[in-house]
Image (cartoon, helix red, strand yellow):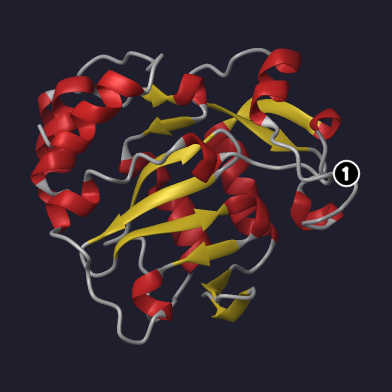
Amino acid sequence: MHENFEYYLKNYGPIGSDVPPDAEIVERISKIYPPSLAGFIGEFGFPSFHDGLFRLCDPEDFRAILALIFKADPDFSHKDCHVVGYSAFGVLKCWSPKYFGFDIELPLGSIYCSALTISDWKPTASADHMASSLVPDDEDVEFFDYDGEPMFARCTELYGKLRKGECFGFVPALAISGPYSPLRRVENVKRLSALEHFSILAQLEDFSLMKITPDDVLPVRRVG
């Protein structure tokens, strides 16, 4: 097991347990993920981290969602991009053998892929090392309300801890009310089925490939 995963197991508790996947899933995972990530999933399954803020998942469950987002995009395809895990609010951590790690923010309709937005992009480490870093720190997948305050702990206190397969979703979705609407508050969140809610978000708007600059976050192009 890669040292990055050992670090998470030792320092990021409580980690929600999961049963090891069956042989068919292990074989399938080993064909699309580097050994560090495939080995971890083969041993521990798809557990949650940061008290449920982030959970690993079977990428096959998200294949149809990626197809809805990417459509016929020239750079992204649901056939060779894989959702490794998702946050409580719908940030998807993805793996691609071409681009390595990239993120999809479902509530905001945004995709962040350094390999496509940095002109001189090169991997900073081996594929195996970078895949083992796809479990994010909690602050990287926290979601913030209209006033800039973190939401996860308050949503958990108000609505209860998420079970496997659940997420926190805005009602109405931010694609309808606006990404920075005053409705972006804990009171407008519900516990929902993750796959069902994510499928709806994937169809509400066209997604944009975004670029982070020193001064701003800018759209590069529409995806699809």
* Amino acid carrying mark 1 in the image: Leu
| Residue closest to the eye, 218 or 39 | 218
Estimate the x, y position of residue 106 in percent, counting from the top left.
59, 52
- Identify the residue at image location x=32%, y=43%: 60
Residue 118 appears left or right of 203 = left
Q: Quadrant of residue 95?
A: bottom left
Residue 5, relative to residue 72: is it above or below?
above
Q: Above or below — where is 189 with respect to 126?
A: above
Image quarter for residue 72?
bottom left
Which residue of the protein is positioned furthest toward the bottom in this rendering? 119
211 lies above or below 137: below
- Count the marks: how many? 1
Residue receiving disc 1: 183
Horizontal relation, residue 77 to residue 29: left or right: right
Residue at the spot 17% in from the left edge and 61% down from the top edge? 125
Percent across and percent down for residue 21 are: 20, 23
- Point out the image quarter for the N terminus: top left
On screen, residue 156 versus residue 121, left or right, reads right
Q: Nearer the viewer, residue 177 or 157?
A: 157
User: How many C-alpha atoms fall within 10 Å of the one at disc 1: few (<14), some, or many (≥20)?
Assistant: some
- Give above or below for 197 relative to 162: below
**Image location (x, y in percent) of residue 36:** 13, 41
Find residue 75 and report its image quarter. Answer: bottom left
Callout 1: SS? loop
- The structure residue drawn at horizontal position 70% and vertical position 42%, both measured from the top left corner, is 144
- Which residue is painted at 61% across and 78% down in the image? 219
At which x and y percent is residue 190?
74, 27
The outermost residue toward the front is 214
